[in-house]
């Protein structure tokens, strides 16, 4: 109980700091010193391309591929795409690409295909690559995987606040509902499961047309999606999710023209940092590299 | 001509009732097998936590309001977008209303005892039921179909239910239209603003809580009212909130200005707790608390 926090605690902490009115995880800006230590920043790449949907309602696969490649090159610091992917997976790796298949808002197929293609181009055998979501526990590739790539679209969620990269590993759990307590606060514990631990090489959070609001748990209305035309890549899932969360919150506030916090807050992202030390959610400890279109980026 | 026949069929179907007279539970087999050009393709029937199998973590919202069961059906038709009907039976009308308050943005009554209608989606509450009818894609036929099914289900729920009594304690002056949430699970305490990342006031399934918005977006205050099962629990929660949130608050100093220049107060009256967060001035906070206390 001693580590638990009230709004008042945050107000006291931020009293002398610049508060711009923006909130992260429903918290005043500057409230992130708890549980994190000084150290290297987590690099996160956000890339956007205004032309992604220029051809209609479906993302252009060539543009999406170009965005992914540029993001990975920037993230790894490599000059070309081949070198970049070679630094992520090796030919001997067995690679599980953990996607998300929720029928109302799945990971776009073109992204799954692109990731698989890049893994194959890195020299991994086709028999050693699998794209899966709900069947990961029974998938031979995932069961023997040496490397995981985590990819999913960003959306609001009726119990965990957002569907995030951290949350995307829920299907590795023998009993997903065992992580529901306290609005899924302990989702970061998924990263300690033997089938997952130490294997994730890359997190990609898709924000092509993120869902920033829902009316019921099953709701994914186009009214509450917008063509952000972006994706986020990083090695730190907490940092990736933290940036994605800021974008969702920024859009909610702009759309509703008031502070409209996620309901419930995305506590699991904060807890992944402060309790599980899986990564950092503190914007001050994230090196955010923004590429491409920057209008209304909300971060 | 096809469209006219379609509408005629809808009209004829609307005259029928899904429920046998006097039946309380919503039987999935009573949903029509066909309507218009749609046919039932998947029956939905989940009891309690079985709902995890259908919507995973999203089920917790319904479970936090005492879900009994969900029945429903997916309808498909040649060349038509899928239509999905979900009927959530809750333990009480108050709980069905509570689920409704989670998603509603305006006051409207097209269906049931309160409804929200969109081209792709309708949801409403009536008696112990929270009902959603949705389509994957909006075309005239699918939009008509969801309106038809919403109307059919509305007519088939014979009784109305009472809203939670605690909402009558909310002062009306300054209250945003559709600007309150009824709940009795602590997770929803942070629905409108972050208050605490734990159950600071011991909210449980025996409580009746309402969180309400007052004032304009740039000068928003929040009123929390909670009815506990007895006076001792209310006093205990009040003491805890005071100690953790505003230890400087006292009988002589019941309104505390916080670091962000907003005002806070908390009190009890009988088995009820009241608190105001983000009060804009002391005067406004006093006024709102006074009105609430008078209603409690």
Image (cartoon, grey):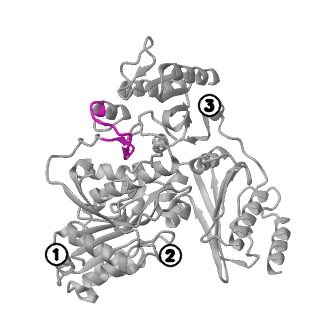
Q: In the shown orientation, is residue A81 left or right of residue B255? A: left
Q: At 52% across and 27% down in the image, what residue appears?
A: B273
Residue B148 relative to residue B12: left or right: left
Q: CA distance from mark 1 to mark 2?
A: 32 Å
Which residue position is annotated with label 3? B170
Chain-order first, disc 1 or disc 2: 2
Q: Which of the 4 image quarters holds residue A189?
A: bottom left
Q: Is A145 contained in the magenta span?
A: no
* Residue A188 can be seen in this image: yes
The kind of secondary structure the magenta stretch mainly shows is loop
Closer to the camera in the image, B90 or B96:
B96
Residue at x 34%, y 70% (from the top left corner)? A151
Q: Is residue B95 above or below residue B294?
A: below
* Mark 1 to mark 3 CA distance (whole Å): 62 Å
| Residue at (39% x, 54% y) in the render | A184
Look at the numbered disc 2 and give the secondary structure of its residue: loop
The residue nearer to you, when weighing A249 against A198, is: A249
Q: Which residues are magenta?
A: A14-29
Write down the residue under mark 2.
A56
Against B26, residue A263 (above or below) is above
Say which chain tag 3 marks: B
Cα distance between the residues tagged 3 and 2: 47 Å
* Residue A119, image x, y percentages: 25, 81
Residue under label 1, please give it: A79
Q: Element type at marker 3?
A: loop
Q: Chain of mark 1?
A: A
**Chain letter of the residue beneath label 2 in the structure image:** A
Which quadrant of the structure image shows residue A12? top left
């Amino acid at each position: 109980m001693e580590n638990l926090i009230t709004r008042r605690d945050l107000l006291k902490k931020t009293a002398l700091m610049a508060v711009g009115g923006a909130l992260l995880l429903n918290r005043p800006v500057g409230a992130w010193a708890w549980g994190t230590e000084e150290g290297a920043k987590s690099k996160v790449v956000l890339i956007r391309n205004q032309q992604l949907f220029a051809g209609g309602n479906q993302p252009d696969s060539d543009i999406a591929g170009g965005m992914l490649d540029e993001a990975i090159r920037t993230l790894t610091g490599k000059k070309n795409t081949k070198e970049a992917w070679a630094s992520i997976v090796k030919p001997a790796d067995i690679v599980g690409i953990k996607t998300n298949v929720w029928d109302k808002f799945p990971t776009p197929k073109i992204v799954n295909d692109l990731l698989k293609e890049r893994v194959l181009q890195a020299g991994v055998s086709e028999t050693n690559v699998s794209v899966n979501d709900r069947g990961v526990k029974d998938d031979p590739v995932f069961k023997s995987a040496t490397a995981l790539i985590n990819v999913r679209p960003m959306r609001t969620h009726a119990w965990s606040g957002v569907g995030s990269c951290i949350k995307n590993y829920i299907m590795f759990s023998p009993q997903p509902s065992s992580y529901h307590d306290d609005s899924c606060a302990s989702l970061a514990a998924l990263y300690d499961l033997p089938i997952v631990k130490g294997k994730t090489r890359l997190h990609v959070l898709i924000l092509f047309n993120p869902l920033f609001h829902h009316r019921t748990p099953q709701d994914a209305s186009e009214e509450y999606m917008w063509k952000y035309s972006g994706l986020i890549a990083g090695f730190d899932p907490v940092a990736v999710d933290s940036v994605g969360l800021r974008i969702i919150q920024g859009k909610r506030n702009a759309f509703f023209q008031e502070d409209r916090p996620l309901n419930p807050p995305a506590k699991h992202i904060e807890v992944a940092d402060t309790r599980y030390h899986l990564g950092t959610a503190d914007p001050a400890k994230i090196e955010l590299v923004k590429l491409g279109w920057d209008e209304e980026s909300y971060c | 001509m096809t469209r006219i026949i379609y509408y005629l069929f809808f009209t004829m179907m609307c005259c029928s009732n899904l429920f046998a007279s006097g039946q309380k539970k919503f039987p999935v087999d009573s949903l029509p097998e066909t309507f218009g050009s749609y046919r039932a393709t998947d029956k939905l029937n989940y009891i309690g936590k079985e709902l995890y199998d259908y919507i995973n973590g999203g089920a917790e919202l319904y479970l936090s309001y005492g879900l009994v069961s969900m029945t429903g059906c997916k309808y498909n038709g040649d060349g038509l977008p899928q239509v999905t009907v979900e009927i959530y039976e809750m333990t009480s009308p108050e709980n069905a209303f509570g689920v409704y308050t989670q998603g509603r943005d305006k006051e409207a009554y097209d269906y049931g005892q309160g409804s929200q209608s969109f081209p792709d989606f309708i949801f409403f509450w009536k008696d112990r039921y929270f009902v959603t009818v949705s389509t994957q894609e909006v075309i005239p036929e699918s939009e008509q179909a969801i309106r038809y099914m919403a109307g059919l289900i509305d007519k088939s729920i014979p009784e109305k239910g009472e809203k939670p009594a605690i909402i009558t304690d909310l002062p009306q002056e300054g209250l945003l239209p559709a600007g309150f949430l009824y709940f009795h699970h602590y997770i929803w305490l942070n629905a409108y603003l972050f208050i605490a990342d734990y159950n600071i006031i011991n909210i449980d399934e025996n409580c009746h809580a309402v969180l309400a918005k007052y004032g304009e977006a740039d000068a928003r205050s929040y009123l929390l009212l909670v009815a506990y099962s007895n006076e001792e629990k209310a006093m205990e929660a009040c003491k805890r909130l005071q100690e953790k949130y505003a230890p400087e608050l006292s009988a002589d100093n019941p309104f505390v200005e916080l670091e962000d220049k907003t005002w806070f107060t908390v009190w009890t009256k009988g088995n009820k707790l009241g608190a105001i967060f983000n009060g804009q001035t002391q005067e406004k906070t006093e006024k709102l608390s006074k009105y609430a206390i008078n209603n409690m």
